[in-house]
Amino acid sequence: MPTKQTPLPAARPVTPHGILVQQLQQLQTAAEQESVTAQFKADLSQVARLAAGLDPYLEACTTAESTALAQLVKATQQEDWSQRFDDGATVKELEQEMLSGHIEGQFLKMLVAISQAKRVLEIGMFTGYSALAIAEALPKDGLLVACEVDAYAAEFAQRCFSTSAHGHKIQVKVAPAIETLRDLASVGEPFDLAFIDADKGGYIEYVNLLLESPLLTPNGFICIDNTLMQGQPYLDTANRTANGEAITRFNQFLAEDDRVEQVMLPIRDGFTLVKRCSSPFS
Ligand SMILES: C[S@@+](CC[C@H](N)C(=O)[O-])C[C@H]1O[C@@H](n2cnc3c(N)ncnc32)[C@H](O)[C@@H]1O
């Protein structure tokens, strides 16, 4: 007899595109109550379908995620993340929406494979989706060092890694990332790629440390998540959250930084790729 499945808690939209889809659908519902023309309703319906179809189409056209990654997503959705954690300075809440997911994970895998990175640093691991995706693309002797301040999330992730043949490539450091970065910088074994996806207020310090210490190889590059922060940097300033303010400041900092060149891509909640400027003498 088939067992009844408990539906997984739905994730709220946390990307500019996801929010756009939700708001268009709300407008469609509102338009049903209003005396608008049939043409207006048809146009609105077309716009809503155009927006709503994009993410599922990206998913369908992208290489499927591994079984271990799919299981990690399911376990993350099933967990009650309402308990809070204290990172020493602020109390925050973990939530399933923190997980980066299929498209971003596959994009990171592609970057690791194309760049032939062997040593990767992750700042902000949560339940380990991006960490495991990166590990899957690393060679057998590759290493991902993942920084995570929350011990509960770190243990959760490590349980997920133990089910994957690539989990052994991941080394987890449970501490505020800035402390781990300073320790790693003193060891002198640089990374080919750093992925920043933690506290948004720390982004400028992380990038400065990566560029000014021996943490990054000369051709090493940095990937930064959430640089669109739900559209807040380009929307009205009055409704910005603390994260929205931090990302707005960070994007401005990066745009004015002549040590680096960068590109911002509208993947999920915004993904910026950064590399050192080529030397004029090279
Ligand atoms: C957006 S989640 C990371 C998502 C993950 N990269 C993924 O793909 O699923 C951010 C994580 O950063 C962690 N974090 C926040 N501040 C931190 C800090 N100062 N040092 C280390 N980790 C931190 C949080 O506990 C949270 O788990």
Image (cartoon, rainbow, N blue to C red):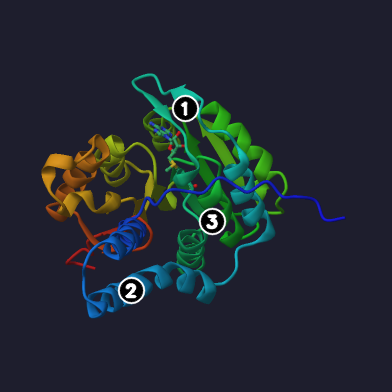
Q: Earlier in the sequence, mark 1 or mark 2?
A: 2
Q: Ligand 1 shows up in which quadrant of the image?
A: top left
Residue 271 point in image, percent of width and height:
34, 58
Callout 2–callout 3 Cβ contact below 8 Å: no
**Label 3: element kind:** helix
SS label for mark 2: helix
Asked if disc 1 and disc 3 are in contact, CB closer than 8 Å, the reply is no
In the rendered image, the residue lying farthest to the bottom is 39
Q: Does the beta carbon at disc 1 come under 8 Å from ligand 1?
A: yes
What is the quadrant of the N terminus in the image?
Answer: bottom right
- Quarter that holds the C terminus: bottom left
Q: Distance between the residues labelled 2 and 3?
A: 38 Å
Report which quarter residue 127 is drawn in: top right
Q: Which of marks 2 and 3 is in front?
A: 2
SS for callout 1: loop
Image position of 67 (left or right of 134): right
Tag shown at residue 45: 2
Within 10 Å of the Cα at label 3, are there few (<14), some (14-19), or many (20+) other Cα atoms?
A: many
Q: In which quarter of the image is residue 182?
A: top left
Q: Which of marks 1 and 2 is in front?
A: 2
* Image x and y of residue 237, in percent: 12, 44
In contact (CB < 8 Å): disc 1 and disc 2: no
Q: Name the residue under label 1.
A: 175
Q: Position of residue 64 (x, y in %)?
A: 60, 68
Real-space CA distance between mark 1 and mark 3, rounded to the nearest whole angstrom: 21 Å
Kindly identify the residue that appears in the image at 47 percent across and 24 percent down: 84
